[in-house]
Amino acid sequence: ARSSSPSSSRRTVFPVVVLVDGASRVDVELVRHELGADAVRRANAALVRETTGYAIGGVPPFGHRTRTRVLADRRLLDHEVVWAAAGTPHAVFALDPKSLIAHAEGTVADVRDTAA
C-alpha cells in the first residue's frame, strides 16, 4: 500500500507493508485510518518491486530495499506459527507471530477486511 499524509501544503507519500494471514484481505480504509492518512492505495507491481526489491507474492515482512512502515493485523497473534514469503513466490519461512512482528518492526492494528 502507499499512503499520503498532509504536511503543510504538500503531501508526503510513503510505502506501507501490511501483514495479514493468508485467508484475509486488507481493508484499505482501516489502514488509512490507522495511519491518519488522507488516502491509501494499493501499490502496483512495479512500485512493489522498486520499493521492496521483491515481486508481489514474494515480498518478505522485512529486509526491503527502502525503509517501509509495517502494519500487522491483530489476528496474526491468534496463530501459533505463521508462514511468510521469503523473497520469491515459492519460498516461505515459519515464525511465531510475535517474533515476526518484532523483526518487521511492525505495529499491531485491526486492518483485516471483515466483510471478505
Image: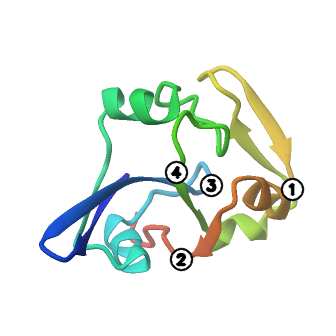
Q: In this rendering, would 20 be left or right of 13?
A: right
Q: Around disc 4, counting alpha carbons within 10 Å, would you say few (fewer than 14), some (14 to 19), or many (20 or more)?
A: many
Who's the residue at 84% across and 58% down the image?
Answer: 99
Residue 65 pos. (x, y %): 55, 33
Residue 105 pos. (x, y %): 69, 60
In whole angstroms, how far apart are the C-alphas of marks 2 and 4? 18 Å
Q: Nearer the viewer, mark 4 or mark 1?
A: 4
Q: Nearer the viewer, mark 3 or mark 4?
A: 4
The earlier-in-sequence mark between 2 and 4 is 4
The residue nearer to you, when weighing 114 against 81, is: 81
Question: Badge 1 is on which residue?
Answer: 96
Residue 51 placement: quadrant: top left
Q: Nearer the viewer, mark 3 or mark 1?
A: 1
The earlier-in-sequence mark between 3 and 4 is 3
Task: Determine whether label 4 and label 1 are within 8 Å by CB.
Answer: no
The residue nearer to you, when weighing 7 against 110, is: 7
Question: Badge 3 is on which residue?
Answer: 21
Q: In this rendering, would 41 be left or right of 83?
A: left
The earlier-in-sequence mark between 4 and 1 is 4
The earlier-in-sequence mark between 3 and 1 is 3
Q: Nearer the viewer, mark 2 or mark 4?
A: 4
- Does dot 2 land on a helix, a strand or a loop? loop
In whole angstroms, how far apart are the C-alphas of marks 3 and 1? 13 Å
